[in-house]
Amino acid sequence: MKESAVTKEQVGRRTGPIEHTNPYHSVEFSINGLEIAYQFKIWNISSTPMCVLVKEDSNILPRLKVGDTLNMKYYTTGAAYSPECLETAILHITKNDQGRFRGHYLVGLEILEGRGQQKLN
């Protein structure tokens, strides 16, 4: 896993749940070998437009690899929209040793457009 820390400047600029740049609020996915699906809030941090925070002691963290592509279920904030399954790549896994996200890894995600898109009912 990539062990570079995110600076206070990067974390302090624009942090919070995704609002205007992406219609999705959270994402859910499972990994082979783990019995449960994991759901994460999507965060917008200036250095990484779309990422999730994973606790450093989470069972899922050692199973995530940069470059992996997974079919992830994306949820919007509105109940009027159905979740979408989208093929997603893991761009980076960055340890954060400072600030409000201490003890977490930032896992950068990128939706691979046109591949694996499926609306769910």
Image: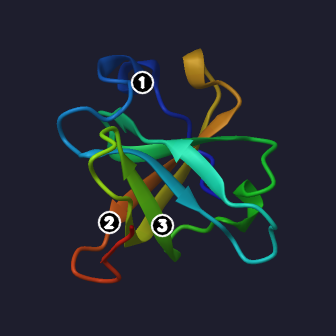
Quarter of the image for the C terminus: give it: bottom left
Q: Amino acid at mark 3?
A: Met
Numbered label tally:
3
- Mark nearest the camera among 3 and 1 is 3
Mark 3 packing: few (<14 Cα in 10 Å), some, or many (20+)?
many
For label 2, the residue is: 111
- In this image, 4 relative to 76: left or right? right
- In this image, 22 relative to 41: left or right? left
Q: Earlier in the sequence, mark 2 or mark 1?
A: 1
- Mark nearest the camera among 3 and 2 is 3
Colouring scheme, one of rainbow, by chain, secondary structure, one colour: rainbow
Q: Earlier in the sequence, mark 3 or mark 1?
A: 1
Mark 1 packing: few (<14 Cα in 10 Å), some, or many (20+)?
many
Residue at 48%, 66% (x, y): give it: 72
For label 3, the residue is: 72
Residue at 38%, 59% (x, y): give it: 83
Q: Residue furthest bottom?
A: 115
Q: Residue furthest left?
A: 20
User: Dot 3 lies on which element?
Assistant: strand
- Residue 11's mark? 1
The residues bearing labels 3 and 1 have C-alpha atoms spaced at a distance of: 25 Å
Q: Position of residue 4 (x, y in %)?
A: 56, 43
- Mark nearest the camera among 2 and 1 is 2
Query: Is residue 78 or residue 74 the one in the foreground?
Result: 78
